[in-house]
Amino acid sequence: MNIELIIKDQVALAISTLYGQTIEAEQVQVQLTRSEFEGDQTVMVFPFLKMSRKSPEATGAEIGDFLVTNLKEVSAYNVVKGFLNLVIDNNYWIDRLNEAIADEKYGFVPVSDEAELVMIEYSSPNTNKPLHLGHIRNNLLGFSLAEVMKANGNKVVKTNIVNDRGVHICKSMVAWQKFGNGETPETNGKKGDHLVGEYYVRFDQQYKSEIAELVAQGRSEDQAKEEAPSILETREMLLKWEANDPEVRNLWRTMNGWVYTGFDETYKTLGVNFDKIYYESDTYTIGRDEVLRGVREGIFQQESDTSVWANLEKEGLDKKILLRSDGTSVYITQDIGTAQLRYRDYPIDHMIYVVGNEQIYHFQVLSLLLDKLGYKWGKDLFHFPYGMVELPNGRMKSREGTVVDADDLVAGMIDVARAVSMELGKLEGYSESEKEQIYHIVALGALKYFILKVDPKKTMTFNPEESIDFNGNTGPFIQYTYARIQSILRKAKETGIAIPGKVDTAILNDKERSLLKIISLFPEVIKEAGMAHSPAVVANYVYDLVKEFNSFYHDHSILNEPDLSIRDFRLTVAQTAGKIIKNGFSLLGIQVPERM
RNA sequence: GGCCCGGUAGCUCAAUGGAUAGAGCAACAGCCUUCUAAGCUGUAGGUUCUUGGUUCGAUCCCAAGCCGGGUCACCA
C-alpha cells in the first residue's frame, strides 16, 4: 500500500484516539518532505490545532509519537513549526523496490475484459497541405495520451478522422487543373502532400489577385471575394463532388492518394499510428441525413434560401449553420456523422478529441447538437484542448512563410543528432544502418520530449535553437542516462555477475534512499497523468528520476564497489531505474537506445 | 464588444492551499588515469502582472483592473 494512504489513515486514527474527533483520512494533508529537512513524508498539523487545543509543536509531537508506535513504516519523526516530518523505515523502500523489480510493467494497470473503452481522436489532417509543427504537437499528444490511458487499464482505440473533402480540398484541385500541367509526385519526385500543398498555396495567390483586380474595377472587398472566378469554380466543383461527378471524383481520388502516401511516411517517421481511420467523405452524408432529420423534427430550422441552422442562443451560444444554401455540408456536419458512426462501431465509454484549443467553441456546439439530436452521449464528449505552438517571434503564419514543416523539422533534427553523435564518436563497432537508427531515435527523442514536457493545455514556444540542444532537460539527456545504465548491465553480464531478482539490504546511503523513493512514485505518476490527461506529468517525472540517478551514479561506483552485496544491490537499482526510464518514455512514444 | 484561456529568473518551463517558489538554457567557477563528461558540483539571477478579498497560511481560490492570445464565418 501507498505510504501516503497508510499515513493518512493512521493520522485520522490518531486524531480520534488523542482528541476524540472524527476526520476523514482524505482530509489529512501529506506531502513529500522538502529536501532541506530530515524525513520523507510530511503531515500538516495546522488543521488539527483546533482539535488538540495545543501548540503546533506539541500537537505534532503527539501525532508523531502515535505514528512511530503504531506504524512499522514510520521509524522516527521531527516537528518543525507546524510540519510533522516522518522518517520512513528503509524496509518500506526496499519492499517497494522489490515490487518494482518483480513487475516488468511496474505501475501499469493491466487491461481487463471489463475495462472501459476510450476512443481517442487525434491527428485529423486536412488533405490539402502537409503536416506542420502544430500537427506534430497534436500527433505526439494523441499518441502519448493513448499510451497513458492504456497504462491506466483502459481499452484504447486510436482513431483519425481525415478531412478529405470540402471547399479547401477543392481549392487545391482547381489550382492543379489550372496550373498543374499534369504534374505528379512521380514526374517531379516531390512528396505527395507537399505537392498538393503547393497547389493550395497557388490557389490562394490566384484568388487574391482576382480579388485585387475586381476591387480595382470598383467592387467592394466582400463582393470581390464572392465573385472571383476561382472561388466560383471551387464552389461548383464542390457541388459536382457531392453529386458524384465522375471526373471530379477521379481527380479527388488521385490527389488524395498522393497526400496519403505522403502522410503515411510522416506518420511512420513520427512513430504514430491508428487503430481505425474514418474519412469525412464517408461520414458527411450521415451527418447531413441527421441534420435533415433534425429539420423534420423541428430541432433545426431551414431558412427560405434552404440553408439549415441551429439556434443555440438559449444555451448562451450563437446561431450555427449546418448546411449551406446550396445544400453542401460544412465542417460540423461531418463531425455529427462521424460521432454517430463511431458509437455504432464501438461500445465507447469515453470519447476524447485531441483538437487545438481554438476549437473549444466548436466542440461545445457539437456536444449540444448531438444532445439535441437525442444522443445521450452527446454531453459526454471530451474535448482535450491543447495549446498552440508558437515560434520565438510569434505565431506561425503561412503567408509569411514561417510555418515549420513537419518533415523538414524531423530531417533537420536527425542531421543534428548525426552531427553530435559523430563528434562524440561513441558508436564504434556499429554498422551504418545501426548508427542511422540511433540518430533517428535520438532526434525524435529530442523533438518529442521537447514538446511533451510542456503542460498540454498551455501555449508553448518552439525555439528551434533550444530544440536541438541535447544537454540539460532534454530527451537525449534522458536517453543517455538509459544508455549508460545499459552499458553497466552489459559489463556485468560479460563478467558473469548475476543481478539478483530481489534485494534485502536495509543499509542505504542518501542517494540510494532518494532513488528508491522516486522509483516508488512511478505508479502514482501514471495515475496522475491519466487523470490530468497530461503526458507532461510523465516527462517531468522521468526527468527527476534521471537527475537523481545521475547524481547517484556520479557519487557511487556500481561495478567497482568492493562490497559484493552492495554492488549487486546497486546493479538491481540501476536496472530498475533503466526499466522505468524505458517504460516511462514508452508512454511518451519515445524510444531509448542501448548505446549512444 | 461578448465568451474562453494565459501572465512565475534574461529565455524555455516546473511547483495536490503549506516551510527559504524550483529545473534547464544563457553567464560565471570547478570536476575526466576511475562503470559513457549528451554527465556531475557550485555561484549569481524573483515585487510569482497590479490592487483588494477568503485563510493559521495564497504562485495556486474569489473579485476588479492591466497586458497577451483564442473564438464568435454559407472556413476548417
Image: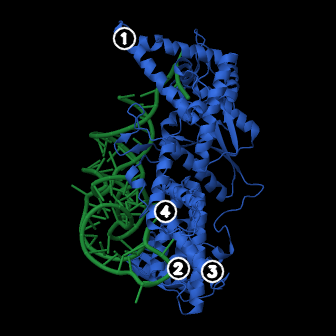
Q: Which residue is mark 4?
A: A476
- Along the horizontal axis of the image, is A322 left or right of A513? right
Disc 2 versus disc 4: distance between alpha carbons?
53 Å
Q: Estimate how packed mark 1 is, as few (under 14), some (14 to 19) or many (20 or more) residues with alpha carbons within 10 Å.
A: some
Q: Earlier in the sequence, mark 4 or mark 3?
A: 3
Q: Are marks 3 and 1 on the same chain?
A: yes
Disc 3 versus disc 1: distance between alpha carbons?
78 Å
Quarter of the figure with residue A399: top left
Label 1 resides on the chain identified as A
Mark nearer the viewer, 1 or 2: 1
In the displayed structure, A378 sits above or below A438; it is above
Q: Estimate how packed mark 4 is, as few (under 14), some (14 to 19) or many (20 or more) residues with alpha carbons within 10 Å.
A: many
Q: Secondary structure at mark 2?
A: helix
Name the residue rendered at 60%, 13% in the picture. Answer: A326
Disc 4 versus disc 1: distance between alpha carbons?
54 Å
Label 1 is placed on what type of residue?
Val
Which quadrant would the N terminus of chain A be assigned to in this image? bottom right
Q: Residue furthest right?
A: A113
Q: Are marks 1 and 2 on the same chain?
A: yes
Letter of the blue chain:
A
Q: Which residue is mark 2?
A: A18
Colour that chain B carries in the picture: green
Q: Nearer the viewer, residue B22 or A271?
A: A271
Label 4 is placed on what type of residue?
Pro
Disc 1 versus disc 2: distance between alpha carbons?
85 Å
Disc 2 versus disc 3: distance between alpha carbons?
30 Å
Q: Earlier in the sequence, mark 4 or mark 1?
A: 1
Label 3 is placed on what type of residue?
Asp
Label 4 resides on the chain identified as A
Residue B17 in percent (x, y) is at 44, 62
